[in-house]
Image (cartoon, grey):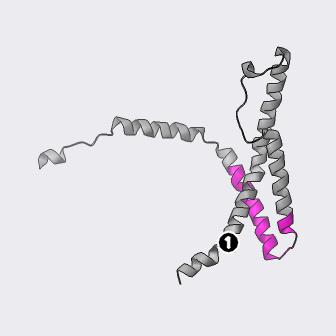
Amino acid sequence: MSAKKNKKYKIKRHEFKSYSDAKKQLRKFDFKTAGLLLLSFTMFFGVFRLGIYFEWKPIYPIYYVLFVVFLGLWLWFNHGFGNKLPLPEDLNMPEEEKQPFLDRLARDKRIAKKLLLVLIPLMLTFAIDFFSLFWIDTISGLFK
């Protein structure tokens, strides 16, 4: 029995490695962007719910137009749904035009990333509204 009391528990090497990897990944997490995303979602969702609460009729068309406009802008600046920049050697153009083209492409990608701060909260607002309109009564009916 005394042998069990004196036994020391050691951390396994693979657990320690995964902990350090998780810590490195957490350092890479962009808290500023997450905070901005949360703030913009709170603002969009709050205004949307206030509009519904006070029965302001144009709230849905305004949000739909905002969504379509920002989705179109995001697709324009992101050049579709891809997110990778082409390699300079893969481009079929003169050498003096390659770098300005890649600079414009990188600038467009940065603008598209900022547009997501509006587009994602709009999508979440519509998803929550859809859920509350069509599924809340169904789910609450299951527990009666």
Q: Residue furthest left?
A: 1
Question: Residue 11 location in percent, x, y?
Answer: 33, 40
Q: Is residue 104 left or right of residue 136?
A: right
Q: Is residue 56 magenta?
A: yes
- The number of callouts visible is 1
Residue name at image x 69 percent, y 55 percent: 38
Residue 16, image quadrant? top left
Question: Residue 54 location in percent, x, y?
Answer: 82, 76
Q: Residue furthest front?
A: 92
Question: Residue 46 location in percent, x, y?
Answer: 75, 65
Q: Is residue 104 above or below residue 125?
A: above
Q: What element does badge 1 sit on?
A: helix
Residue name at image x 85 percent, y 52 percent: 69
Q: Nearer the viewer, residue 14 or 94?
A: 94
Magenta part of the chain: 35-61
Q: Residue furthest top?
A: 95
- By secondary structure, the bulk of the magenta-drawn segment is best described as helix
Residue 53, image quadrant? bottom right
Residue name at image x 29 percent, y 40 percent: 10
Label 1 amino acid? Ser
Q: Is residue 101 magenta?
A: no
Residue name at image x 79 percent, y 46 percent: 115
Q: Is residue 113 left or right of residue 139?
A: right
**Disc 1 crowd, CA 10 A, few/some/many (<14, 14-19, 20+):** few
The residue to which callout 1 is attached is 132
Question: Residue 84 location in percent, x, y?
Answer: 70, 33
